[in-house]
Image (cartoon, grey):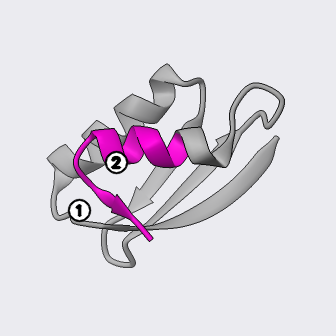
Amino acid sequence: MKKVELQVEGMSCGHCVNAIEGALKKLHAHAVVDLASKIVTVEFDENDLSVERIKEAIEEQGYDVM
């Protein structure tokens, strides 16, 4: 398992957390969102999923990945 931390702008509430965690769960990744620091920590199998695809999934929810 690989772990990455991504800076994500535009998150402000529980709905944002649920949207991001839900989108990444569909990709079989485990995400923890920290609204205060605007950091999303993602654990995933790098044989099945890329960081680029994770970023795309977050951006598809309407958030900006730095």
Question: SS of the residue at dot 1?
Answer: loop
Question: SS of the residue at dot 2?
Answer: helix
Circle 2 is placed at which residue position?
59
Dot 2: within a 10 Å radius of its alpha carbon, few (fewer than 14), some, or many (20 or more) residues? some
Magenta stretch in the rendered image: 54-66
Circle 1 is placed at which residue position?
11
- Which is nearer the eye, 60 or 29? 60
The amino acid on which the numbered mark 2 sits, given as a three-letter code, is Glu
Is residue 17 shown above or below 29?
A: below
Where residue 36 sits, quadrant-wise, is bottom left
Indicate whether residue 65 is drawn in magenta: yes
Is 16 situated left or right of 41 in this image? left
Q: Quadrant of the C terminus?
A: bottom left
Dot 1: within a 10 Å radius of its alpha carbon, few (fewer than 14), some, or many (20 or more) residues? many
The amino acid on which the numbered mark 1 sits, given as a three-letter code, is Met
Q: CA distance from mark 2 to mark 1?
A: 11 Å
Is residue 46 shown above or below 32?
A: above
Picture coordinates of residue 43 (x, y %)?
A: 67, 45
